[in-house]
Amino acid sequence: MYNVRKIKENLYWVGANDRNLANFERIIPIPRGVSYNSYILLDEKNVLFDTMDASAGDLFFENIAHVLNGKPLDYLVVHHVEPDHASNIHRVMEAYPEAVLVCTAKASQMIKQFFGNGFESRMMAVKEGDTLLLGKHNLTFVLAPMVHWPEVMVSYETTEKILFSADAFGTFGALYGPMFADEMNFDRDWLDDARRYYTNIVGKYGTQVQMLLNKAAGLEISLLCPLHGPMWRENLGYFIDKYQKWSTYTPESEGVLIVYASMYGHTENMAEIFASKINEAGVKELAVYNLSHTDCSYMIADAFKYSRILLVAPTYNNGLNPLMENFLHELAARFIQKRTFAIAENGTWMPASGKIMRSIVEEMKNCTVLEPTFTIKSALHPEQLSDMDTFINQFIHN
Ligand SMILES: Cc1cc2nc3c(=O)[nH]c(=O)nc-3n(C[C@H](O)[C@H](O)[C@H](O)COP(=O)(O)O)c2cc1C
Ligand SMILES: [Fe+2]
Ligand SMILES: [Fe+2]
């Protein structure tokens, strides 16, 4: 049965929650699920903003039919062609033969790639600043290329000052009743997943997000409607400030992130002792992750949060532990900048992991990589503790 939510007069959420998908994009774990937000705005012309992931099935069509209640669907606005929002484009166009599909020229090309040329004659390509009059409401289209696909645009409704922001300002986490961020403790319950969503999905495109934020800065926004997670009608500055930080690679905290790998626990023991000593040296905000246990999306998120990152890994077949190697490549792929790295290695016959970690992080922009590498052979011993203190002192005061 339909499950729709009234967001405000004439604006309805017709989306769906997904608590079945284990990994978003079949890569990133989403233990709290995800929502796919789709909206209908009713006016003289009725508009559907984006479609839905295939998993929503018939529910999406029941939702649309319930809100339209026999009225025609005049426009389908497609902000983004990634299949989590675009899987049902062809079905909507078939079910509503009078509907015109509004999207960027790039999006129309992608839609043809996914669905063929079947409804080419019903596509309307829009450019930056184009408008669409709906009656009392009026849409202006704003292009947001590479946030995080090339065809992306957002729509601004000028009468009620609503920004339909596509994936920007989205988050992992299914909706659980409340629809607005101001009805939730966002900072406590959602921010970590919002950061994990941003950094893993969009994190590489900080420059392009900055361009979108600069355009949005010129708009008065009373309601923000993203494609995932809660809607925003209060305190938007809080979330925009997070986006400012993330997209400029500015740390939120002067704390320390420790990421380690260990096959048999000796490198892990060194990482644990590092955490204790760094805390004893006065650092209160710390996060420690074991790469063998936690998905690296959590560490990528915390690498964007903290200013200092300590990498701790053993040598493996004369190379670097592969989990650490993968993590560092994932981090480098997000163009992380402005961090201080420290490196600690282990090796039983010829430690080599430190050199490899260093070579990867040294390529990162505006980062400091501390010298020297802290090295243990097989296990940490008490006579190394004073060297460790010196190393930590340099790290946390850099
Ligand atoms: C499969 C495997 C390959 C390893 N390759 C190397 C190596 O090439 N050079 C080296 O110095 N140590 C090597 N080691 C030893 C580790 O770097 C490390 O000293 C040892 O595993 C103890 O640390 P851990 O308890 O954290 O795993 C290897 C260990 C394993 C299990
Ligand atoms: Fe997307
Ligand atoms: Fe999305």
Image (tube, rainbow, N blue to C red):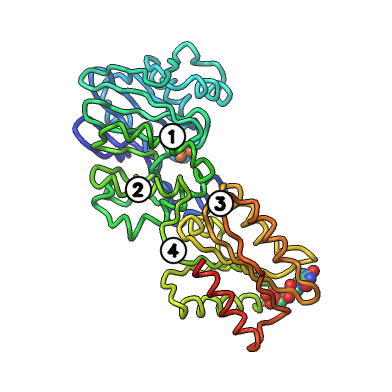
Disc assigned to residue 211: 1
| Mark 3 and mark 4: Cα distance apart in space | 16 Å
Residue located beneath label 3 in the image: 366
| Mark 1 and mark 2: Cα distance apart in space | 15 Å
Residue nearest the viewer, comparing 137 with 210? 210
Residue nearest the viewer, comparing 62 with 339? 339
Secondary structure under tag 1 reads helix
Q: Is residue 397 above or below residue 84?
A: below
| Mark 4 and mark 2: Cα distance apart in space | 17 Å
Secondary structure under tag 4 reads strand
Residue displayed at 23% across by 45% down: 234
Crowding around mark 3 (Cα neighbors within 10 Å: few <14, some 14 to 19, many 20+) is: few
Q: Is residue 43 left or right of residue 374?
A: left
Disc assigned to residue 254: 4
* Viewer-side label of 1, 3: 3
Residue nearest the viewer, comparing 141 with 357? 357
Could you tell me the amino acid type at mark 4? Glu
Crowding around mark 4 (Cα neighbors within 10 Å: few <14, some 14 to 19, many 20+) is: some
Residue displayed at 30% across by 43% down: 231
First in residue order: circle 1 vs circle 2? 1
| Mark 1 and mark 4: Cα distance apart in space | 27 Å
Q: Is residue 136 left or right of residue 372?
A: left
Crowding around mark 1 (Cα neighbors within 10 Å: few <14, some 14 to 19, many 20+) is: some
First in residue order: circle 2 vs circle 3? 2
Disc assigned to residue 241: 2
Could you tell me the amino acid type at mark 1? Met
